[in-house]
Amino acid sequence: LEINRDEESFLKGEPVLLNGDEDLKLLVVSIDGVEIPTKSFKIEENSLYVTSDKKNFVLQTRVEIDPSSNKSCMGLYKSKSLYCTQMEPEGFRKVTFFPDKPDVLSKFTTTIIADKEKYPTLLSNGNLISETEIAGGRKKVIWEDPFPKPSCLFALIAGDLGLISDSFVTKSGKKVLLEVYSDKGNEDLCWHAMNSLKKSMKWDEDRFNLEYDLDRFMIVAVDDFNFGGMENKGLNIFNSSVTLVSPETATDRTYFRVEAIVAHEYFHNWTGNRIACRDWFQLTLKEGLTVLRDQEFSSDLHSRSVCRIDNVDYVRSIQFKEDASPNAHPIRPESFTSIDNFYTPTVYRKGSEVIRMILSMYGESAFQAGMKKYFELYDGQSVRTEDFLHAMELGTGKDLTQFKNWYSQAGTPRVKVTSSYNEESQVFTLKLEQSCPATPGQIKKKPFVIPLKIALLSEEGKELSFICEKISENSIIELRQKNEEFSFKNVLSKPILSINRNFTAPVIIEEDLSLEKRIKHLCVENDPVNRYIAGQNLLTEELLKIIKGKKNDFSEEIIEAFGKCLYSDIKDYSLIARYIELPSISTVVSTLSTINFEKVKESIVSFCKKFALFHSEKLFEIYQELNKELDYEYQWVEKDVAKRELKNRVLFYLICSEKHEYIELGYKQAQTANNFTDTYSALSSLANSNSQLFDKASKDFYEKYRSENLVIQKWFALIASRNQPSVLEDIKRIEKLKEFLNDRPNHISLLYKTFSMNPIYFNKEDGSGYKFFADKIIEIAKFNPNVAAVFIKQFNYYSKLNSSRQALIKAELERIKASVRDMKNSSLIIEVIDNTLS
């Protein structure tokens, strides 16, 4: 390490501090090549303190570590025969003593020496400087990264891997070598990732004018990895589940996911790597911004409406749930015990929505001007969210002072809508009131800036013209006060309000509408996102009425309205599939003060059966038509993906009808489909039927795919999600299979975390589900505390359960807490438990 101390710390005689870990065995400490005595350094709380009378010097440390015993998938660890790293957020201190903080930017030169037969693949960040053979049958490689970076972006790979190669010529004419590495034999499964990378590089040049800056870009697929991917400078490391795909082993959605994650990690090269975070409180600075960029990438390549609906659905069902939980936090947290706990939907997805509001309010040109300023001012630096907002103010010419409340306040704002129409004056008046529920540590909230895109629709669904002084050219009104009133003049007929179109703000809109008006809104809404949300809200409201005992059954009117799109002339089949999608259980229960999971599940199952029977002829007609149109070799192209989505959505409903001929139809598809999307979709739809055909199809699926790791782990999740009394025993049988590896993050997450989302059998009144899950958390915490902490967040519903279930959960959480207290890195687990119980 080249140490250059500032004048103040040098004059005070302060020691140099390097972060470390208890598993580091320190062998030597040297200054300028001379070993220093033990009195010149000390280790306290895993940190190394070195004293010297020199202001500038070269500090060398030599340590010994054992990657093969490191099962946490953090730092340097061994995945089968492959040495691999994951450094973000604080993994580098598990490798050696270092000032392991995001604002310490360093240029890294990495030398790797290894047996050339066992480890022919030796990779690190940057450009390859030299590769030589040395004595003892070993190979020595030197990599140099010319760009300063924090230690969390360091990466190293050593193994014997397969490789595919390609190249990309940047807009300035530089040829970049592209490489994707995987286990040997999987090379053909890497080409989709490679093509996704090339699309990402081209898109970033076209949309953001950002060019790649090194001579090569590498991706490595690893089976044992805690995350989807990691953006290490020039050497991205990916979970193999989001790298390797083929029509025989991956669904259409997996293809989309691989493309999006490859793009996300590549886009970090500028938003996260070239410009880094000043500290971990600024995590949303890189993650929220990069999520926005990968969402825009997907939207530019595919159906913008469908991509937006998928992203909005995630925010409404997952992020809103976190906002309403004991673990609610701002997108920029004010404090934390462990940063590992803040890689959350709030930091990522809400962070993205907050930045998207700037794009929506001021438009693409102004937003790009702000991004240009951001790169001009801060390239090569570590910065704060305030710096990003400053660049946006310069680019847009707008004051974002009040807008900063989105960064410091937790919770999901609510906007109460009241409207009236004066037929005589032809004035439509809109009254809005914003509020935000109390969250941990934040009782009162300051008003947010809430941009709401508006349209006024006629009874026929046409947009009405109007005059409004407070609306922008983007059709957006900005709610800045607690209460505001907006007048729309020259409105020729009583309008139907379409508000927060395209989900311009991550808020909950509260409108006191009758059932008749809700149905009317659903039928005339012409904004795809609002059309989707209107259907979700309509069905959710009806489900809640039945759950609360206010209604006995679903009216024909509701069932007909929810399925009206089946009879429409909508050309995008993916949109129709989204429009008849069921609300998630988390969305349904989010407004309940006390959750009765049995009643929730019962009401959803009842709706599915009634919907399927009411529309069965049309559903079957659509299935037959699309199945016939897809009767050729699988292609991952937009039109085919859309057809498969709708075909498999209607198959799901047909099987829900419980008619034997439709269950047989699903079984036939599971057995004879020419692609994995159709196979797995049919099996999933059969999973919660009571038919013995599922058992037969499931057994056949297992026998066919048991040697395909990427597939069999999906089967684990399918079994764990079944609404069947035998589910816990089925999970225990899976644990005994040789294909299940109980220390692999993918396997334990897909089996155990999926079970924790099984509403009935995870929440059994006898507490058996809670006890089983707690046992697994305690086991996993011993070797991978990060995954264990994520699992505990599945208890976020704690405060909404009845007192007996709360008592059962509390006992299990206290048992977990007592069991892990003396374990390494237990603080991140205990922090989540304390937040949940608070």
Image (tube, helix red, strand yellow):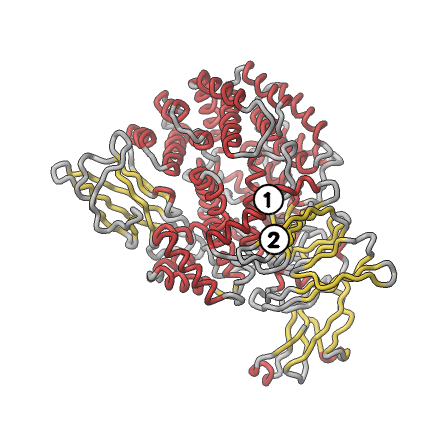
In the depicted structure, whether residue 208 falls above or below residue 610: below
Residue 225 in view of the camera: yes
- The residue that mark 2 highlights is 230
The residue most toward the right is 136
- Residue 27 in the image: state x and y as whole percent: 78, 70
Other residues around mark 2 within 10 Å, as few (<14) / some (14–19) / many (≥20): many
Position of 585 with respect to 679 (left or right) is left
Q: Secondary structure at mark 2?
A: strand
Position of 268 with respect to 555 (left or right) is right
- Amino acid type at circle 1 is Asn
Q: Which is nearer the eye, 585 or 229?
A: 229
- Which numbered disc flags the more N-terminal residue, 1 or 2? 1
Q: Residue at x 38, y 49 (%)?
A: 437
- The residue that mark 1 highlights is 195
Q: Residue at x 82, y 57 (%)?
A: 115
- Amino acid type at circle 2 is Met
- Residue 776 in the image: state x and y as whole percent: 66, 43
Other residues around mark 1 within 10 Å, as few (<14) / some (14–19) / many (≥20): few
Q: Nearer the viewer, mark 1 or mark 2?
A: 1
Q: Residue at x 54, y 21 (%)?
A: 627
**Residues under numbered marks 1 and 2 in contact, where contact means CB atoms less than 8 Å apart:** no
Q: Which is nearer the eye, 54 or 467?
A: 467
Q: Quadrant of the N terminus?
A: bottom right
Position of 369 with respect to 518 (left or right) is right
